[in-house]
Amino acid sequence: MENKHIRIGIIGLGNIAKQHINNIITGEVADCSITAICSRQPAQIEGLAQVQHFTRYQDLIDSGSVDAVLIATPTLSHFEIAQYALHKHLHVMLEKPIGLSSYEGEQLVSSVGENTKFALMLNQRCDPTYAKIKQVVKSGILGKMTRTHWTMTNWFRPEVYFQVSDWRATWKGEGGGALVNQCIHNLDIFQWVCGLPEQIIGFCEFGKYHDIEVEDEVTAFLRYDNQATGVFVASTGEAPGVNRFDIIGDKGSLHYDSGRLIQKLNSESTHRFNKQTTDMFGMPDVIQTDITPTGKVNQHAMIMNNFVRAILFDEPLLTPAQSGLASLDMANAMLMSTWLNQPVKLPLDRKRYQAELATKIAHSQLREKANIEATVDMNKSYR
């Protein structure tokens, strides 16, 4: 690309969009600038007083003033805005999730032109701890994976979080609750590290802790094609909550809990020891090591910098949009298993799930936003 500077349009000016804007105008994201913004109502954003403002995303995309767009709108509009931008051959960075369903996401991915970059903001892949977990598992040092378990219940959200929004926690506006909003990042890391299971049994509770129609607590059982098993537990109604991720292998294990990452390596294969020992109560010797990374990174800026370099220099995308389909498949499978009261096999039948979701959407309505002055500290929202 001849132009070594990318003109970016920001569509949506909510909490996460403002964080992206700050990363760009403070130089955390290089080789780009914001040349247009879009929101339904006129907005004054510090540092963007001279930037073009549009109230219709179509007008921003058609303006000729941007090379790429960052879409940070409510989930229900992700599909239509991203599809319009892709059809106009603009590069797209889309906030998670890729759509109300993986079926929607699949349609978007099929719309990408040959020279168009389409990325998803799966920023937690840049988290040093999760990157370390991925590295250890990929190295094979743990041996064959036998069990996985992630309890992720510290996504607590009070009622006001939903009351100040008309789209959150509705089938029509978000396509789900805890799974597709908060835990989509965890499901992405789960499958990125451990792979997709071949079968999921889900038990979702709808409106258990909040006045909402979608899931705010989930327990799911996973089975992988090598006979490994797994459990995923999620909640937005539990305080203080737990974030514990265990990966068990034949030669060792990883345990992430309370901010610490512990590696345990056996002196020999558990399978081998099990078959050969004559010690009735024996167990392989184990070496335990704290391998918690100490550095911190700006995850969102890392993903955006990669997106810009992909456009300018054809650098491979860290989080191409298609990589967001697998985690949404898992979330969709957990919901469909609950609705049908039966196991769901993967690869997911995306069309069938879309039909089930359409039924929910048909009986869903956006809520009326409460007139509440909510306190917002985005730093508290990340887990």
Image (spheres, helix red, strand yellow):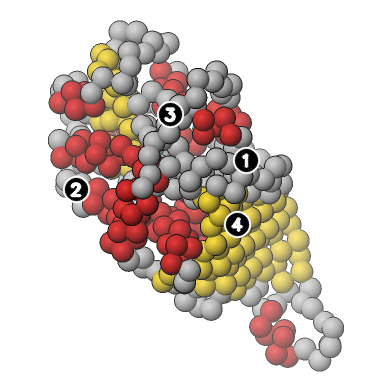
Q: Residue at x 15, y 26 (%)?
A: 62
Q: Position of residue 86 (x, y in %)?
A: 20, 40
The mark found on residue 368 in the picture is 3
Q: Nearer the viewer, residue 117 or 339?
A: 339
* Tag 3: amino acid: Glu
Q: Would you place residue 139 above or below residue 119 in this image? A: below
Q: Circle 2 — which element?
A: loop
Q: Position of residue 305 (x, y in %)?
A: 39, 33
Disc 3 packing (10 Å; few <14; some 14–19; many ≥20): few
Foreground label between 1 and 2: 1
Q: Nearer the viewer, mark 2 or mark 4?
A: 4
Alpha carbon distance from label 4 to label 1: 13 Å
Q: Residue at x 42, y 25 (%)?
A: 14
Q: Which tag, 2 or 4, sits closer to the chain's start?
A: 2
The label shown at residue 233 is 4
Which residue in the structure is indicated by mark 2?
Answer: 111
In this rendered view, identify the residue nearer to me: 13 or 137: 13
Quarter containing the N terminus: top left
Q: Earlier in the sequence, mark 3 or mark 2?
A: 2
Q: Disc 3 to disc 2, how far (Cα)?
A: 34 Å
| Residue lying at 31% horizontally and 53% vertically, measured from the top left | 358
In the picture of the structure, the residue carrying the numbered disc 1 is 156
Q: Is residue 317 left or right of residue 327?
A: left
Kindly report the distance in space between the C-alpha atoms of the residues bearing marks 1 and 2.
Answer: 36 Å
Quadrant where the C terminus sits is top right
